[in-house]
């Protein structure tokens, strides 16, 4: 999956889409490292200081990604499936206005 995303990033010419792909790759890579953090620490691939910062980096990446979440999900075609979710899911603020 990571290789395919990197290939798509390289071939993409749209700045906005390219940024979204880059953010998706970052979130995915952070989750992979976090999942195997013990191995990375034991083998000296990552320092203890970097491991301590992993949660903060992931939280920042998620915060940066959230505004683009609907665009990412639409790009996967999820919103083309009727009756998949409640209207509040699409736009919380507009639903409650």
Image (cartoon, rainbow, N blue to C red):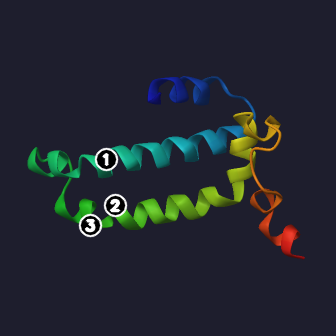
Distance from label 2 to label 3 (Cα)?
Answer: 6 Å
Residue 50: give x, y in percent of width and height.
26, 60
Q: Which residue is mark 3?
A: 52
Residue 74: give x, y in percent of width and height.
76, 41
Q: Earlier in the sequence, mark 1 or mark 2?
A: 1
Distance from label 3 to label 1 (Cα)?
Answer: 12 Å
Residue 43: give x, y in percent of width and height.
10, 44
In what quadrant of the picture does the C terminus appear? bottom right
Q: Which residue is mark 2?
A: 54
* Secondary structure beneath label 3: helix
Residue 4 vertical placement versus 25 (above, below):
above
- Residue 6 vs residue 31, the one in the foreground: 31
What crowding class fits label 3: few (fewer than 14 Cα within 10 Å), some (14-19), or many (20 or more)? few
Residue at point 50%, 64% (across, down): 60
What crowding class fits label 1: few (fewer than 14 Cα within 10 Å), some (14-19), or many (20 or more)? some
Residue at point 32%, 65% (across, down): 53
Tell me whether the residue at label 2 lies in contact with that at label 3, contact meaning CB atoms closer than 8 angstroms.
Answer: yes
Residue at point 85%, 75% (across, down): 96
Q: Which residue is mark 1?
A: 33
Residue 75 vertical placement versus 56 (above, below):
above
* Secondary structure beneath label 1: helix
**For this view, does 54 lie left or right of residue 19?**
left
């Amino acid at each position: 999956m990571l290789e395919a995303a990197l290939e798509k990033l390289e071939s993409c010419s749209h700045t906005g889409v390219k940024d979204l792909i880059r953010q998706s790759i970052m979130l995915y890579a952070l989750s992979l490292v976090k999942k195997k953090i013990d191995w990375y620490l034991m083998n000296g691939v990552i320092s203890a200081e970097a491991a301590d910062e992993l949660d903060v980096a992931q939280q920042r990446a998620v915060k940066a990604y959230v505004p683009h979440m609907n665009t990412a999900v639409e790009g996967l075609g999820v919103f083309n499936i009727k009756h998949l979710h409640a209207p509040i899911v699409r736009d919380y603020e507009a639903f409650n206005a």
